[in-house]
Image (tube, rainbow, N blue to C red):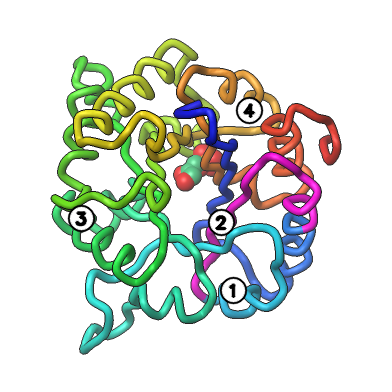
Amino acid sequence: MANDAARPLIVGNWKMNGLRADLPAVMAIDAMAGACAGVDVGLALPFTLIPRCAGMVNHAMLGAQNCHARPGGAFTGEVSGTMLADCGAAFVILGHSERRQGQHEDNAVVQGKVRAAIAAGLSVILCVGESAAERATGQAETAVRRQVLASLPADPPSGRALTIAYEPVWAIGTGVTPDAPAIGAMHGVLRETLLSLGYPAALLPRLLYGGSVNAGNAAAILRIAHVDGALVGNASLEPQSFGAILDQAAGAPTFGL
Ligand code: 13P
C-alpha cells in the first residue's frame, strides 16, 4: 500500500455501457460496496446514468469518465466538472487511453481537465500507461513518468483528491496483463515520481492497476507492492465478476463466483 492509512480502492469503469435496464446491476454493486468493509468502491458511469443513480446509490462513490476543462460556456455537447458535481458525481476519470487515442487528448488537454475537475470539487483518477511500441522499445517507464508530470497541474491536487491508474494500453480489453514484476516496477516508478513532486509518503495518491483485471487475476495483482487497487473495465459490468474482485480486495469470499 502507498501508506498505512490507504484502503484498497476498486473502481469499475463502465465506459460507453449502461442503460436504465442496467440499474439493478448498479444497485447490486452498491449493496456489495456496503457489505465490503475495508474496501473503497467506485463506479464510473456514463453521464446519462449519474443523476439517475445519485439518489439511489449509498455506498459506492459515483464518478464520470470525462469532463471539459471549462466550468461552462459555449461548448456544444460537452459536460463540465461543475455539472458532474452538481448531479452527484464524486470523482472523474481523466486521461484514459481511449480518450488520449480516440479523442486526441494530449497531456496539456488532460492537465486542463484535471485542474477544472479539482476546482469543481471532484476527485480525479488520472490514467497513464505506455503503448505496446513504447514497451517493446524500452520506453515504458519514461513515457509513463512523462504522462504523470505533464498531466498534473503545477500545483498538484492533494493526495486525497488524486488517484493514479496505471493502465498499459496493450493490456486494456485484451486479456493480457504485464507480469507481476513489470506491474511492481511501474508502480515503483509512479511512487518515486509522486514523491519527487513533493507528496508526503504518508499521503501519496493511491495507485491503481488497470487492464484486463478479472476475478481470476485480481488477487495476485492486488498483492503486488504499491498496488492500492484496481480500475476494472469489462469485469465491472457484471455484479458477480465485480463482486469476486471486491472479495479479493477484502480478503474474504462474500460475493464471489
Ligand atoms: P478492461 O478491464 O476491460 O481491460 O478495461 C480496463 C480499463 O480500461 C479500465 O479503465
191 to the left or right of 219: left
Q: Residue at x 42, y 48 (%)?
A: 160
Q: Which mark is residue 111?
A: 3
Task: Determine which of the numbered discs, if any, sits on residue 14 in the image.
Answer: 2
Which residue in the protein does label 4 denote?
218
Amino acid type shown at disc 3: Gln
Mark with earlier residue (2, 3): 2
Q: Secondary structure at mark 2?
A: loop
Residue 4 versus residue 163 in the image, above or below: above
Q: On the image, which quarter does residue 248 sit in?
A: top right
Q: Is residue 169 magenta?
A: no
Q: Mark 2–mark 1 contact, CB under 8 Å?
A: yes
- Circle 4 Cα neighbour tier, 10 Å, few/some/many (<14 / 14–19 / ≥20): many
In percent of width and height, residue 58 lies at 71, 66
Which is closer to the viewer, label 3 or label 4?
Answer: 3
Please provide the residue range marked out in magenta.
31-47
Dot 4 amino acid type: Ala
- What is the three-letter code of the residue carrying label 1? Leu
Badge 3 element: helix
Q: Is mark 3 within 8 Å of ligand 1?
A: no
- Upstream in sequence: badge 2 or badge 1: 2
- Whether label 2 lies within 8 Å of ligand 1 gets the answer no
Mark 4 vs mark 2, foreground winner is: 4
Name the residue tied to disc 1. 49
The C terminus, quarter of image: top right
Q: Looking at the picture, does residue 28 appear above or below residue 139?
A: below
- What percent of the width, then of the height, locates residue 72? 27, 84
Q: Earlier in the sequence, mark 3 or mark 1?
A: 1
C-alpha separation, residue under disc 1 versus residue under disc 4: 27 Å
Q: CA distance from mark 2 to mark 1?
A: 11 Å
Instruction: Tell me the crowding category of disc 3: few under 14, some 14 to 19, or many 20 or more residues within 10 angstroms, Cα based.
Output: many
Q: Earlier in the sequence, mark 1 or mark 4?
A: 1
